Image (spheres, rainbow, N blue to C red):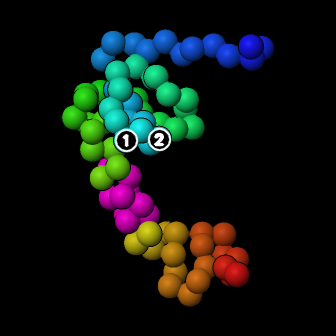
Amino acid sequence: MALFKRRTTGKPGEWYYCLEHGTVEEGPQCRAADRFGPYGTREEAAHAMETARERNQEWDNDPKWHDGQGRGKSGSKEA
């Protein structure tokens, strides 16, 4: 038996998207590293992957993070 293995109890109305199972769950049921959330509604959680893709695309196109010369915000060259 693991020394610190505690089951996280969920709160009604908190929704998560489990990356491992590809399912929506009410309250955290899977480990934190395997889920997105919490979301306010089941529908928001169901669209978690779309939301993540949209945010990644926004960040990829954000001029504050990319100057078009292979440099990030820190100004160091990428390998």
Disc 1 to disc 2: CB gap under 8 Å = yes
Residue at 45%, 73% (x, y): give it.
Answer: 63
Separation of residues labelled 1 and 2 (CA atoms): 6 Å
Identify which amino acid the numbered label 1 is placed on.
Answer: Gly
Image quadrant holding the N terminus, namely: top right
Q: Residue furthest right?
A: 3
Q: Residue furthest bottom?
A: 69
Say whether residue 3 is left or right of residue 63: right
Please identify the quarter of the rendering in which residue 44 is found: top left
Q: Which residue is label 1 attached to?
A: 22
Residue at 67%, 79% (x, y): give it.
Answer: 78
Say whether residue 48 is left or right of residue 67: left
Q: Is residue 45 above or below residue 77?
A: above
Q: Which residue is label 2 attached to?
A: 20
Q: At which x and y percent is residue 16? A: 38, 31
Which region is colored magenta? 51-59
Q: Residue furthest front?
A: 1
Identify which amino acid the numbered label 2 is placed on.
Answer: Glu
Could you say which disc has been placed on residue 42 in the image?
A: none
